[in-house]
Amino acid sequence: MTYLENTPSAHPDHLLEKRERIRRFGDDMEFRELSNQWRAMALERKYMNNFSWLGRPLIQLPQDAMALQEIIWAVQPDLVIETGIAHGGSLMLSASMLELIGKGEVLGIDIEIRTHNRQAIERHPLSRRIRMLEGSSIAPEIVAQVQAAAVGKKSVLVCLDSNHTHEHVLAELRAYAGLVTLGSYCVVFDTFVEDMPDDYVWTDRPWGKGNNPKTAVWEWLKTHPEFQIDKSIEDRLLITSAPDGFLRRVA
């Protein structure tokens, strides 16, 4: 069962219609290819830098923000762990959903939290839902603090969006995916790097085809059958930075 089916307020006929439409999207190669082309153009034009969430810049595709709010509402997490803070927009998205739910904390990790971003986040009305750790997300001392924060939490959601190299994301998966609770998700962003055109050049970035979050996900899943890729999320979004990156814990 995905979060689509875990929506008791929705009418059964509505869910059935939605499920069938999303299934058709998954098989619609023309629509999917157009979506991939649009995403590549959007990246070149920095389209995802156009948005904010409750006043903080959110460097994310709007479709992925929509998926995250749906996941958080369905999972009702006590703790959201996010690697990669940047300007704090994603922290605000998660914190605002937790505020609506009436519980929970967002724990953000970044190797560098710039002073102006930290100050803006700490002054925000939702700051009481947010805690930040500065350091590498795969450093043992940071991992230990995050694991301690997850102790006793009934529901934990993880979002990985920091360094996008294969080895770094694989290390993050090994450190944090095990904290995800049954029925919740580990969302791995920027897996779309593997799907970019062969001639695309990643300027001043250490990742690219064959070395990115998607290749890390593929390798990690070989030995972690307790997680499955929830294709229904990608199929409904079509335009997403996280193809094969919505990992649901099923065991």
Image: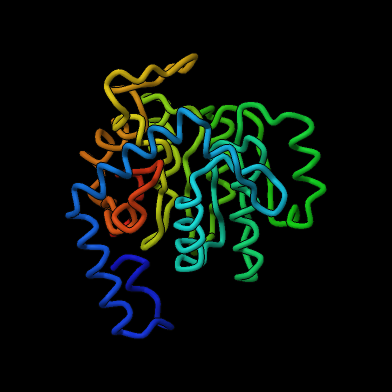
Residue 39: % across, % down? 39, 38
**Position above or below: 172 against 124:** above
Depth check: 105 or 67 in front?
67
Identified at 46% across, 18% down, the residue is 205
> Where 214 falls versus 73 (above or below)?
above
State the residue in front, 208 or 118. Answer: 208
- Residue 12 picture location, percent across and down: 30, 84
The image shows residue 251, relative to residue 32, as above or below, that is: below
Would you identify the image quadrant in which residue 102 lies? bottom right
The residue nearer to you, when weighing 111 against 14, is 14
Q: Position of residue 40 (x, y in %)?
A: 38, 33
Horizontal arrangement in the rendering, residue 117 relative to residue 5 (left or right): right
Q: For residue 43, which quarter of the picture?
A: top left
In the rendered image, the residue lying farthest to the top is 204
Question: Could you tell whether 37 is left or right of 84 in the image?
Answer: left
Task: Report the residue at 21% width, 39% height from top.
Answer: 222
Q: Is 87 displayed left or right of 32 in the figure?
A: right
Coordinates of residue 9 in the picture (x, y in percent): 43, 83
**Residue 180 vertical position relative to residue 112 in the rendered view, above or below:** below
Name the image quarter holding the C terminus. bottom left
Seen at 27% across and 21% down, the residue is 198
Q: Which residue corresponds to the image point at 47% horizontal and 64% vertical from the top-left? A: 70
- Count of picture labels: 0
